[in-house]
Amino acid sequence: MIRSIPKKFPSGLVVLLLAGCAAGPLPKAARVEPPSHYLADAAPVSDTAADGADQHFEPGAPPPAWWHAFDSAALDALVEEGLAHSPSLQAAQHTLEAAHEQLRVQIGNNLFPSVDLGFAPSRQRALGIPILPQQTFLYDVFALEGQASYRFDFFGAYVNADRALARQVEQQRLQFEATRRALATNIVIATINAASLSDTLEATQQQAALAEQYAQQVASRARLGSVSQDESWAAEQSAATLAASLPGIRAQLLTVRHAQAVLLGRSPEQAPPPLSLESLHLPEHVPLSVPSELLHQRPDIQAAEAGMRGAAYQAGAAAALLYPSLTLSASYGRGGFDWSTFTSPAGALWSVGATLTQPLFQGGALRAQKREYADLYEAAQSAYRQTVLAAFENVADTLASLEQDAEALAQSRRAADAAHAAQLDTAARYRLGAMPWTAALTADQQYQNARGALLRARAARLADTASLFQALGVAPTAADGAAEKGGH
């Protein structure tokens, strides 16, 4: 049982301790003024059109499941599989759950009184008094005691420590959210790259087959003397060069597929078959948040802000350690050398006390710790500003890439259309006997080369669109947040 503080306890000291709660205000969190636009030279973000697909940038925040904008059920299934089965994501989630439990442990230790109950029966043989004939004595000890103690946090040392850890847990939760969204982006980009490489491999194989036919035709003509040997060697070199590029493309495709399988939580041999680029539709309506809203959408920015605020609370806790602390303790129990004494009123044991501690000399450790956490807070502020600037840069770079992707795709489409028209015209003239077969093969090669460039341009536009969704972050929704809390 805990008794009240004696009346002689200095009441002025209690007032001083309570007044100390307001001492040492916490530093304010830094703010970064967002720019009015993303791109340099105040260039407006304009809609793009290429390859028959118009992309419009509209005000707003991207949805949580932004990958649905690619209108591919197969892609949706891959992303959902990765989010559900990725070992790295599961490890991050369990680490986050452990951090939540660590916070509960610290709050339980700092905020609430501690109460313990102990029962210690023992049988002992001990030395007696030297003048007595019996040198040792055999006796029993029975002790049952409950102990309680509570530390008063007048200056906020423990409260600030709890708040600092809570911010660290919040920072970890936001980092987990950033990891989850980055995993979705990596799966989407890996799927796009696998589709692009698969289609590129097919186009290159056709080019290599046409080059081989052309080299054989030129070699036959060289043996008949209708063309020079130099032309035959050049055709042979071209065919060999294209054939030599195939193993590299195959290896690159397998590497991408293996990485995609690991992102999905599969082993490499269980990699899914590549999709075709035709099955992935370019999102035509892309929500584009204004720079001021980006601060509230990107998980990495929110995580940096939580880390900065946590550092501020740590600085406050370190400063509070310089002031006095008060701990009350009490215990009550029963004891005796036999059961009759243990159960009788004479066996009652109790104690009550208060400990007031004021650090006087710690070799400068406490003040150095205060300066340490103040410096860490300044570092966290700088890290927050750098994260914000990097986020704006990320969005600006992706928007610039998308504009250039559209221009490159438009020109690639133009080149592919021209090569296709030339290929059809040459094939028709060959059938009429107006052109040699080698001319038709050359036209086919040029068309397949232009088609490969078109496929790469399409893939780049799709991948940069996915990167833009990732760069913009996602505004949290109530349903999304409830699901996350339930999962934790």
Image (cartoon, rainbow, N blue to C red):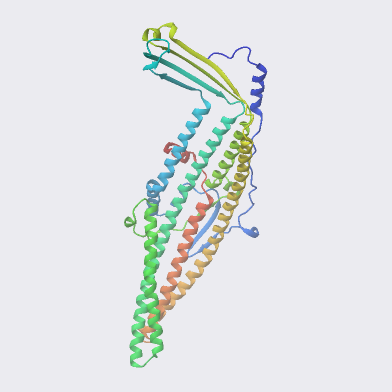
Q: Is residue 379 left or right of residue 425?
A: right
The residue lying at 37 percent from left, 59 percent from top is 257
Residue that extends furthest to the bottom in the rendered view of this protein:
225
Mark yes or no: residue 21 visible: yes
- Point out residue 419 in the picture as x, y percentages from the top left corner: 44, 75
Give above or below for 159 relative to 409: above
Tell me what residue is drawn at x 56 percent, y 30 percent.
Answer: 158
Of residues 277 and 238, which is closer to you in this image?
A: 238
In this rendered view, identify the residue nearer to me: 153 or 244: 153
The quarter of the displayed image where residue 167 is located: top right
Q: Is residue 43 visible?
A: no
Q: Which image quarter: residue 3?
A: top right
Q: Give the quarter of the image for residue 119.
A: top left
Residue 180 at x, y = what percent? 45, 47
Q: Give the left or right position of residue 399, taking residue 214 as reference.
A: right
Location of residue 392 with respect to 30 vertically, above or below: below
The residue at 41%/44% (across/down) is: 91
Outermost residue toward the left in this view:
269
Q: Point out residue 377 in the picture as x, y percentages from the top left corner.
A: 61, 42
Q: Which percent across, then down, holds residue 103?
A: 49, 34
